[in-house]
């Protein structure tokens, strides 16, 4: 029910949604739930490391924004049919070492991934919050 109230291919602030509710909603419709708690991250590299670890990216992950996009799109697409995705990036850093520009670049990767999956008619919803 919860996911029916959220557009299928979007990146948005988590706002009033709770992580547990999003996880249950994803499981309820058989979609992948990807969660990264970024509270300990301070830099772009910390954020990428934590996402790679949390999302179980392959060891050869390049730990840059292009590699993140590839892992969120082509790599998964080549693995076969996908049911959809609910992604949560909790507590993105908000500091001089990971400033607004860095956050927007990261979120742009997820926006591009949402477009990629949207073209394939596969729901991809990404929710984020800041520290």
Image: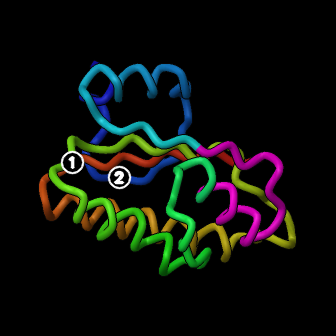
Q: Kindly identify the residue that appears in the image at 85 percent across and 72 percent down.
A: 97
Point out the stretch of residues depicted in magenta: 36-51
Q: Is residue 44 magenta?
A: yes
Q: Nearer the viewer, residue 75 or 14?
A: 75
Is the residue 100 above or below the residue 52 in the image?
A: below
Q: Earlier in the sequence, mark 1 or mark 2?
A: 2
Spot occupied by residue 34 in the image (x, y as percentages of width and height): 48, 43
The front one of 34 and 105 is: 34
Residue 23 x/y as whole percent: 45, 26
Residue highlighted by disc 1? 82
Q: CA distance from mark 1 to mark 2?
A: 17 Å
Q: Residues within 10 Å of mark 2 (few under 14, many from 20)?
A: some
* Quadrant in which the N terminus appears: top left
| Disc 2 element | strand
| 57 to 129, vertically: above or below | below
Above or below, comparing residue 63 to residue 117 in the picture: below
- Disc on res. 10: 2
């Amino acid at each position: 029910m919860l996911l029916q109230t959220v557009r299928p291919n979007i990146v948005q602030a988590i706002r009033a949604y709770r992580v547990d509710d999003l996880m249950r909603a994803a499981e309820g419709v058989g979609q992948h739930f990807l969660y990264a708690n970024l509270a300990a991250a301070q830099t772009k590299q910390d954020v990428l490391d934590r996402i790679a670890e949390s999302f179980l990216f392959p060891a050869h992950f390049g730990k840059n924004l292009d590699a993140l996009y590839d892992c969120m799109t082509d790599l998964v697409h080549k693995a076969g049919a996908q049911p959809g995705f609910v992604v949560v990036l909790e507590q993105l850093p908000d500091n001089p070492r990971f400033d607004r520009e860095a956050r927007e670049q990261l979120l742009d990767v997820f926006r591009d991934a949402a477009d990629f999956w949207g073209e394939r008619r596969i729901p991809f919803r990404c929710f984020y919050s800041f520290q």
